[in-house]
Image (tube, helix red, strand yellow):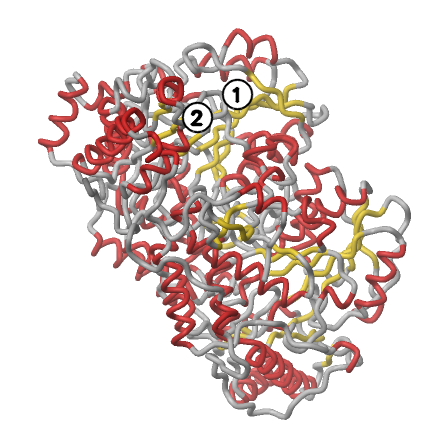
Amino acid sequence: MRFAPHTNDDVAQMLSRLGFGSLDRLFDQIPESVRLERPLALPDGVSELELVEDLRTLATRNRSADDLVCFAGGGAYDHYVPAVVWALAGRSEFYTSYTPYQPELSQGVLQALFEYQSMVCELTALDVSNASLYDGATALVEAVNLARAATGRGRVLVSETVDPRYLATLRTYGLGAGYEPETFPAPEGRGGAPAVAEDVGCVIVQHPNAYGILEPARELFATARAGGARAIQVFDPLSLGVLAPPGDLGADVAVAEGQVLGNHLSFGGPYLGVIAARMEDVRRMPGRIVGETVDVDGRTGYVLTLQAREQHIRRETAVSNICTNQTLMAIAAAVYLAWLGPEGLAELGRLCSAKAAYAAERLADLPGVDLRYPDAPFFKEFALRLPLPAAEVRRALADRGYLAGVPVGDLLVVAVTERRTRSQIDGLVEAMAGVLG
Amino acid sequence: MTIGAPVRRQGPRGEGSILGISRPERRASSLPRADVPGATLPSDAIRATPPRLPEVAERDLVRHYTRLSQMNFGVDTGIYPLGSCTMKYNPKVAETVAGAPGFQRLHPLQPDNTVQGALELLWRLEGALCEITGMARATLQPPAGACGELTGLLLMRAYHQAGGGGPRRRVVIPDSAHGTNPASVRMGGYEAVSVPSDPRGLVDVGELRKIVDEEVAGLMLTNPNTLGLFEEEIQDITSIVHDAGGLVYYDGANLNAILGRCRPGDMGFDIVHINTHKTFATPHGGGGPGAGPVGVREELVPFLPAPTVEKDGTSGAFYLDHDRPRSIGRVHGFNGNFGVLVRAYAYVFGHGADGLKHVAEHAVLNANYLAELLRGVYPLAYSEPPMHEFVATARPLKERHGVRAMDVAKRLIDLGYHPPTVYFPLVVDEAMMVEPTETETKESLEAFAAALRQAAGEAESDPALLREAPTSTPVRRLDEARAARSLRLRW
């Protein structure tokens, strides 16, 4: 495969114009001592046909969610991606462009991002969003940076019901930023009493949490705010047709994994980090933000705005280092949300929650299987206590055709989306009974 | 003269908001009928008023976003010579293979034995990237270059702390560096110190020697540097830092220029990040996604983010290794931008050793040829021969005709081209940073040069044509000051 188009004659003419005898002459500046005097130890190039065969072979060594019935969640969910989403987001005028540095040539991406930002604000009942961050976990990192800068307070309190991978990601970035996230206990899988001292910059609550459980978010956020900290919510965008939005619950900053908004599972990425905040924090928001304005003729148009926050202007005093983001995934999210509409979003939420309730009831009927938190309300995920180690049960169920869930500690967290049918749920129950024998 | 120009005078002249076509109860979505009883959620958790999302038919949705796409310029539309961005052609086959259900429909938390093909792909790609850069191991988790930079800086911290001392305080970057470098340095808990460029546009080695001491954790450098010039004294530079116990970080923004010709590891770099969306042609997506793998030397391997992909020596099975006690931890929620990495794999193995070298040779040829075609009109900012990109200046046009680099850029739009990067690097007055990439033909380079020369001629004969450009686009020059003053960031 080669995509450099020159013929030998082209190369000869170009070199001649440059007064060079060979291509090697172009690399004269590289000192001999560091030149690679051998070919790279890689196979030589192949034809497109051979490449496709190689990748087809690799792809068939995986068992996808088309093959295994997917009840796995933990931040990435098997929601249906309608055909229209990638028919539009996959248009090459979008995907082969870059950051809209020349707005007159980039109104398509800019307006799509403005619409995405608007829909995120509508979903969350908050004031301002951005053109996307990398994923849910790194969006939480950015939210913490925002909160610590806004409050001038360093400590970070995290409910122990926040996704363990999000907590691990916070720990990593905290090494550089100079904080170590501190967890507070949540008795019975929810709630708790964060001690919001004067040096606490933010309190992080996931709602619905890593066990799928609805948190007493209003009380937790009120406690955070009363103590002068920013209240940060990790949310599920597809819960917000039925569940009260972060802004109404009292969150100052809301972040989410946007994969569920029309993006494929794709083994963990590319997804998108969703963030929304209140207007008072707009100048601390990370990443690109699109604003509406007018051109010299008074025509409405869109530009990247508030760039004085960003790395290419402010360098070491920028609010974040983010440059490349997940714009294409944000465009997909906008198309998906417009496809759903408000009624579709609510109907989807009701379907997930009903199917999860049915699955939980049936699974908890199995001997030795219990809901870990039987009294806690949940949305589309729930935690099971099993008589055997969760990882072992999951492996055995994969052999029977089910991605049964995600182990969190010794629990198995099971997710149910609108794609799962009653008969698939019944099938999982039967297979689980077989495994637990 | 009309050259290329599919975006101009075609497509809609503006498109209203999607909310403008929204009608109550209209709807595109269809969902399955409920096959289980309804569930009840606690009343205090329920949303009171629905979000104001668009209510549209699918046909309207399709027309709206199709029109928006027609108001956008991409590599598929025409030459996109943004300096430092490597906007090369994105092979279609990469899209096809990444869309295979065996990749696209994998959950990130599946048991390892159900994702052997995906893990093998990552393992092979890691090996290839290490060979290309001269590193021992790499993490594929960072989702973009800036995240790769920060990952590298956290690795630097871990390395220095493991040595028994503190993490050290400062990181040195050239004054021509991309803005993400200093921003990443600060997020990594370090103070950025700038080393000036010498009159040739290269790192001032004498100044570097004065700056580097035992409080310097490391140096971040691109090579070729941000001005498109190869740092000839690279071995002295890396030695100065190493002698003071520091590490040298290679920002892979410009790796396209040296594929198969030389390797960061052989120049003395300790940590390398790669922008797959630049060098390996994974699509830029209007601003992302990217992927920013980070490779390291042997001594730094224990600190790499967890999990890594490993191959069991006995069974040959691949697995994710989470048990890495000295690791800096996770830098992404899952396994990085896997879908992007599949495309990078397709590019790397499709080209192979011979093809990658060919890429670098033709990228450098194209940049030099284009610079030559512009000689006398847009002088190079530095006299050193460029590699894969060059920085020219519109200073003569400003001095003679009061026409600025931005005016030239906007006139290029009317002539049917995406302009180069302007006003970057910051150290060059009226900078125009041009990176044609290897995938442009000789004819395309000549036509682009002709357009730039035409604009220079018009700067003399009809400067208003440049100052008022563009006139052929859906909107003309936009009021950015107003956008920042009276914020409208949502409907």
Which subunit holds the residue at mark 1?
A: B
User: Callout 1: few (<14), some (14-19), or many (20+) C-alpha neighbours within 10 Å?
Assistant: many
Q: How many marks?
A: 2
Position of residue A302 in the picture relative to residue B261 (left or right) = right
> Where, quadrant-wise, is the C terminus of chain A in this rendering?
bottom right
Residue A232 lies, in percent from the top left, at: 74, 57
Residue B131 shows up from this direction = no
In the rendered structure, the answer to whether residue B128 lies left or right of residue A259 reads left
Judging from the image, what secondary structure is the residue with disc 2 in?
loop
Q: Considering only vertical position in the picture, is B83 above or below A417?
A: above
**Can the viewer see residue A214 in this picture?**
yes
Task: Write down the residue under mark 1.
Answer: B174
Image vertical order of residue B126 relative to residue A397, above or below: above
Left or right position of A224 against B402: right
Query: Which residue is outermost to the left?
Result: A9
**Residue that mark 2 sits on:** B226
Q: Which quarter of the picture shows residue A433? A: bottom right
Using the numbered discs, state the Cα–Cα distance from disc 1 to disc 2 in whole angstroms. 9 Å
Residue B213, x across and y down, in percent: 64, 13
Pointers 1 and 2 in contact (CB under 8 A)?
Answer: yes
The quadrant where residue A189 appears: bottom right
Earlier sequence position, callout 1 versus callout 2: 1
Type of the residue with mark 1: Pro
Disc number for residue B260: none
Evaluate whether label 1 is on the same chain as label 2.
Answer: yes
- Vertically, is B281 above or below B58? above
Q: Amino acid at mark 2?
A: Thr
Residue B377 position within the rendered picture, expressed as x and y whole percent measured from the top left: 28, 21
Identity of the residue drawn at 49% across and 38% down:
B294
